[in-house]
Image: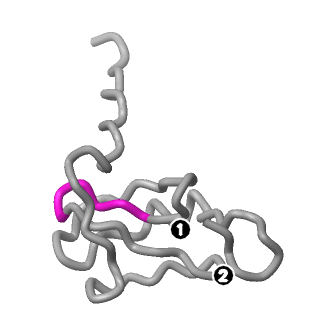
Amino acid sequence: MADGRDGRKAAVDPKLLELLACPLTKGPLTWDPERGELVSRVAKLAYPVRDGIPIMLPSEARTISAEDVLPAPPPRLSGPS
């Protein structure tokens, strides 16, 4: 999805992604670069990013199906005990 100005795909700053949460579930969001959306797996919603600005309104979000949900990130490995 282009950001609407120069045809490039929008991106979300990783620091911002750490701070953002789904407004409905308060859970984490995952960046989907192919669609330019922030995905809440728990709520099964994809929030659009327009001109680099996340639109965190449930009324603007797209409902996603189980097939659209990105695979879960790999578990973090803990160090030696």
Query: Could you say where residue 22 lies in the image, as x and y percent from the top left?
Result: 28, 71
Farthest right residue? Answer: 6
Q: Is residue 69 above or below residue 73?
A: below
Label 2 environment density (alpha carbons within 10 Å; few <14, some 14–19, many ≥20): some
**Which quadrant would the C terminus be assigned to in this image?**
top left
As helix, strand or loop, the secondary structure at mark 2 comes to: loop
Q: Report which quarter residue 77 is drawn in.
A: top left
Task: Look at 32% across and 50% down and name the residue there.
Answer: 68
Q: Is residue 28 above or below residue 45?
A: above
Decide which of 1, 58 is in the foreground and name it.
1
Task: Look at 60% across and 65% down and name the residue there.
Answer: 1
Task: Look at 46% across and 75% down and name the residue there.
Answer: 48
**Quick check: is 62 in the magenta stretch?**
no
Q: Which residue is mark 2?
A: 51
Which three-letter amino acid code belongs to the residue tagged 2? Asp
Q: Which mark is residue 16?
A: 1
Q: Report which quarter residue 45 is drawn in.
A: bottom left
Q: Find the magenta span and give its range.
A: 38-43
* Marked residue nearer the N-terminal end (1 or 2): 1
Which three-letter amino acid code belongs to the residue tagged 1? Leu
Q: CA distance from mark 1 to mark 2?
A: 15 Å
Task: Look at 43% across and 68% down and name the residue there.
Answer: 19
